[in-house]
Amino acid sequence: MSAEPTQEEPISATATYEPLIEAERAAEADAAGDAKGRGVLRFYELAKKQEWQVRDLPWGEVPPIPETREGASPEKKARRQAVWRSVITQQLQADELAVEMAGQLLNLAPHPEAKLYYSTMVQDEARHVEAWLKLAHDAGGTAERDPHLDALVEMTLNADTLEEKVFQMQVFFERLIIPRFRLIARSSRGTVLEDVCNRLTIDDGIHHSAGVAYERVLLE
């Protein structure tokens, strides 16, 4: 499934890394200056600026997933398609569950700046689900769900405190998924799947950094 990367940065999202880096640095300065809430607001503002729509993806212009080389047997084509369908299904499942978790954070957060941020995060996760659903359809359908992922999400939803929920979802899980998106993007050059992963690398980077900023507020 993997292929040698031809370049280090994602194709369609390169220009958007700098605003995230700048927001992270500014949030650290806010925290040092005892203005931690302002750090959370920075990621709300950044999320609004970076918002994209599913219609922005290159539907119909490039293949949805990597195509098997010409001359491959039908069996090999079917196996490769099944692998990519499984990849897409896992990400669809993760973002379906992320919508639920983001909604819970929106409802539980007592700070206005955090509620503003989580309003954008709920929209992000819902948009991700929309993109994965359309991509799954174009790739031939979904595969089997991962029961272990369901169990992990259930653990986060049932965490005792808001601090634990923010840490598990944003500080830990969101950070964990970013390298996976980069790997998938490098392995699916020239496809809609690559474009989706490039965009989600940025979105989840914002989610992670916002979680770090909000943990500073919660742990005061």
Image (cartoon, rainbow, N blue to C red):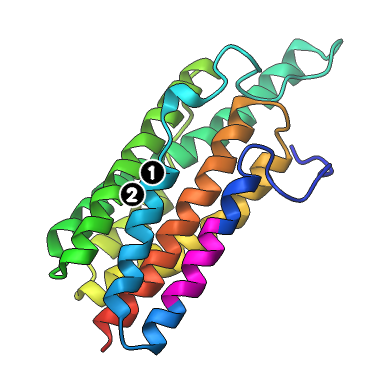
Q: Is residue 206 magenta?
A: no
**Highlighted magenta segment, given as a residue range:** 19-27
The one of 70 and 55 positioned closer to us in this rendering: 55
Give the answer, above or below, for where 31 lies relative to 181: below
For residue 95, which numbered disc appears in the image? Answer: 1
Q: CA distance from mark 1 to mark 2?
A: 5 Å
In depth, the one of 27 and 74 nearer the eye is 27
Q: Is residue 196 left or right of residue 8?
A: left
Compared to residue 106, the image places residue 95 above or below, namely above
Residue 26 position, x and y percent, is: 46, 73
Q: Disc 1, disc 2: CB below 8 Å?
A: yes
Residue 98, labelled with which disc? 2
Estimate how packed mark 2 is, as few (under 14), some (14 to 19) or many (20 or more) residues with alpha carbons within 10 Å.
many
Left or right: where does residue 32 sit relative to residue 68? Answer: left
Question: SS at mark 2?
Answer: helix
Where residue 104 sits: x, y (%)? 19, 56
Q: What residue sits 87% from the left and 10% below the top?
A: 71
Which quarter of the rendering shows the N terminus? top right
Looking at the image, which is closer to me, 107 or 151?
107
Q: Position of residue 199 (x, y in %)?
A: 53, 41
Q: Residue at x 56, y 28 (%)?
A: 85
Kind of residue at disc 2? Ala
200 or 36, which is in the foreground?
Answer: 36
